[in-house]
Image (tube, helix red, strand yellow):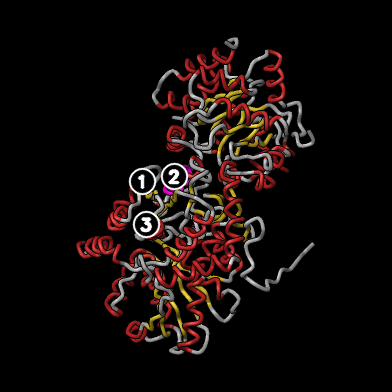
Amino acid sequence: MSSAPASSAADRLARRFAALKAEGRGGLVTYMMAGDPDHATALSLMQGLPQAGADIIELGMPFSDPMADGPAIQAAAVRALQGGMTLHGTLETVAAFRAGDDETPVILMGYYNPVYLYGVEAFARDAVAAGADGVILVDLPPEEAAEVLPAFRAHGLHLIFLTTPTSDDARLPMILKDASGFVYHVSIAGITGAQAAQEDAVAEMVRHIRAHTELPVAIGFGISTPAQAARFARLADAAVVGSAIVRRVAEGGDALGFVRELADAVRAPAP
Amino acid sequence: MTQIQTLNTYRGGPDDRGRFGPYGGRFVAETLMPLILDLERAWDSARVDPAFQAELQGYLSSYVGRPSPITLAQRLTDRLGGARIYFKREDLNHTGAHKVNNCMGQILLARRMGKTRIIAETGAGQHGVATATVCALFGMPCVVYMGATDIERQAPNVFRMKLLGAEVRPVTSGSGTLKDAMNEALRDWVTNVESTYYLIGTAAGPHPYPAMVRDLQKVIGEETRAQIMAAEGRLPDTVVACVGGGSNAIGMFHPFLDDPSVALIGVEAAGEGLDRHHAASMAGGRPGVLHGNRTYLLQDADGQITEAHSISAGLDYPGVGPEHAWLRDTGRVSYVPITDDEAIEAFQMVTQLEGIIPALESSHAVAHAIKIAPGLPADHILVVNMSGRGDKDIAAVAKAIGAKENLS
C-alpha cells in the first residue's frame, strides 16, 4: 500500500500477521497501561507477555482525561500518573522491552494531547527509535489524521485507524484509505470494559471492512474472557483484551496467568 | 511565500473543518464522528430555516422572557466616578442565566432530529438547570452529569434539577468538576448513539458545538447593541464578560467583533492567583487538544490536563472555547484575570449598590469593570454582561466572607 510506512525492515506487524496466517489462527492482542502501577512492575509484566502468549502488545499511554475508557482503564491511568509515568517514560518502557524482544509488535494507544504537546515529529522519531510499531490515537479521527500522518509515515510508524459500529459504508473507504498496519475494529458503541458485542453483528461488520481493505482486522472492546477472545479472534485476524487484564493488575492478581489462559483459548482448535 | 493576512471580518469563522485559525476541529472518537457530522448537517439546515427560527423566537420571548433589558448601574457608576456602567441583564432570564438561550435552541434541534433522550454536563449547575427546564417543557428524559465536588457546592441547583425531573449523576473521577462531567457525558453519548442528544452548555467541544452555541447566544450581543443605541445613540466603548468555556462572552462579543471602536474584554478566573491555583487557561495555559477541540488548556509538561480552581463553579474548567483562543491570538479581544477575592468584593459591592445579586461567574466581569471604570472618562460607555444571578452562590459567598472575617 502506498500509505504503508517507508521502513519495512521494522515491520514487525506484517511479519506477525503473516505468521498467524501461516499458523491458521487469530492472534491475541493484550492491552496494558504503561507505568501501572509503577514503571518496574509494568515493565516486568510487559516482558512476560510474549512468553505468556500475547502475539501483539498494546501499551497504554496514560492520560488524565481518557473519555473513551471505562472505569478499569481510567483507574489504571490514574495509578500510572500517580506513579510518575509520562510519555517519555512510556517510550522508555518500550525501549527497555525491545532490548529483550525484537519481534513482538508494540502498539501505543492513547489520546492525542500528550503526543501533540511532545511534538508530533519528535514523538514519531522517538517512538520508532524506542521500538514502537504503531500508534492508536483514540481522539484523532480520519478527519484530523493529516496532523500526524506525514511525520508518522516519514519515520515508519503505523497510524492504526479505528472502525466502529457507526462507521457506515460511506465512511469506511475514507477511514481505510490511509490505514496501515492493521485495522482496529471497536466492536461496540461504547467505552472500554463494556459488555461484549453480538458476534453475528461483528462478523457482518468485518465483512464490510474487508470489502475496503486487505489489512488484518483486530476486534476490541468488551472482550473479557478466554472463550470470548477465542471466538472474536476467529471472526477476524486478532482479538484485543484490555480491561480484563488491567483489572487483574489492579487487584494484584496473576495477570500473566490470565494472559496464558487467553492465549491457550485462541490457540485451541475451533469447536 | 509570505502572506500578510488582513482580516476583513472577525465574524467569518469557523471554516468548513470547524477551525478558528488553528483552534477548534473535531477531535472525537470515531464512534462519535458520524453523529457530529449529522449534527452539523441538522444545524446547518435548522439555522437557516425560517420555521425553526420562528419557533425559537417564540419560545425565547414567551418562555425565556427575552429580550432581557439593559440597566444603567447608576450608583455603581457614581461610586466609581468614571465610566458609565450598564449591565446586560441575562440574570433576568427564566432559570436565572444566559444558559437557557442555548438550551432552548438545542432542544428544538434535538426534537427536529428525532432524538428522544437528552444528556448534559454541568459545572455550576446553571446549564444543568436550564437543560432540565427545557426537558421538562418538552417532556424529554434528561440525565445531567455533574462533578461530585460541584454537587456539594451547588446543592440548590442539584435539588432544582431533580425537581424538574432530571437525573443528576455524580461524577467522582478526576477532580469531580466540570471537565470530568464532560468526560462522563461523552462516555454516555458514545454508548447511546442512536437515541441521545448531547446538549453541550458552552461554546466548546467538537465542531459544530462552538459555532452553534455561539449562534444561539449571540442574541445577547445583538440585543445589547440595539438597546445601547436606543439609550445612548451610539455603540459602547467597552464590553466586558466573564469567560469559563466562554458562551456568554462569545454571545456578547460576536456582534461587536467588526466594530473596531468597541474594546472587548474577556475575564478569566484567576482563582487564588495566577501563580497558584486558577482557571485562567489563556493566561496560564497553552494550546492542546481536549473534549473534541484544540484550544488553550491548563496542562503540565507531559500534556496531562491539570485541575482548574475557581470559587465560581461555572468558570472552573481547564479549557476555553476555541473561538476565544483565536480571538486572543489575533488580539481582537483582550483577556484579563480576576481572582476569587476580587470577585467576592465585586459580588458584595453590586449587591449593596444596585440591589442585584450577581452570579459569582458574572462577578468576575463586574470586578474588572470596577477596576477600570475609575480611570475612564464619564462619557465612556462600559457594558458588563450580567450573565446570571447569584442566588445559587449565597452559601459559597457566606463561607468565603466568613473565612476572611475569621482570619482578620
**Magenta segment, prevailing SS (helix, strand or loop):** helix
- The label on residue B136 is 3
**Crowd around label 1: few <14 · some 14–19 · many ≥20 (10 Å):** some
Which residue corresponds to mark 1?
Answer: B169
Name the image quarter holding the N terminus of chain A: top right
Q: Percent x, y for residue B14?
A: 62, 62
Earlier sequence position, callout 2 versus callout 1: 1
Task: Please give left or right for residue B336 compared with residue A234 in the image.
Answer: left
Q: Which residues are magenta?
A: B180-188
Residue at point 52% right, 29% down?
A197
Which sits in the foreground, B406 or B221? B221
**Disc 2 residue type (three-letter):** Glu
Residue at point 40% right, 69% down?
B64
Q: Secondary structure at mark 3?
A: helix
Which residue corresponds to mark 2?
Answer: B184
Earlier sequence position, callout 3 versus callout 1: 3
**Label 2: chain letter:** B
Are dots 2 and 1 in contact, CB under 8 Å? yes
Q: Percent x, y for residue B196?
A: 48, 47
Q: Percent x, y for residue A116?
A: 60, 46
Residue at point 53% right, 46% down?
B303
Q: Is residue B364 visible?
A: no
Q: Is residue B186 above or below residue A21?
A: below
Are dots 3 and 2 in contact, CB under 8 Å? no
Taking the magenta stretch, the answer to whether it contains residue B31 is no
**Disc 1 residue type (three-letter):** Arg
**Crowd around label 2: few <14 · some 14–19 · many ≥20 (10 Å):** many
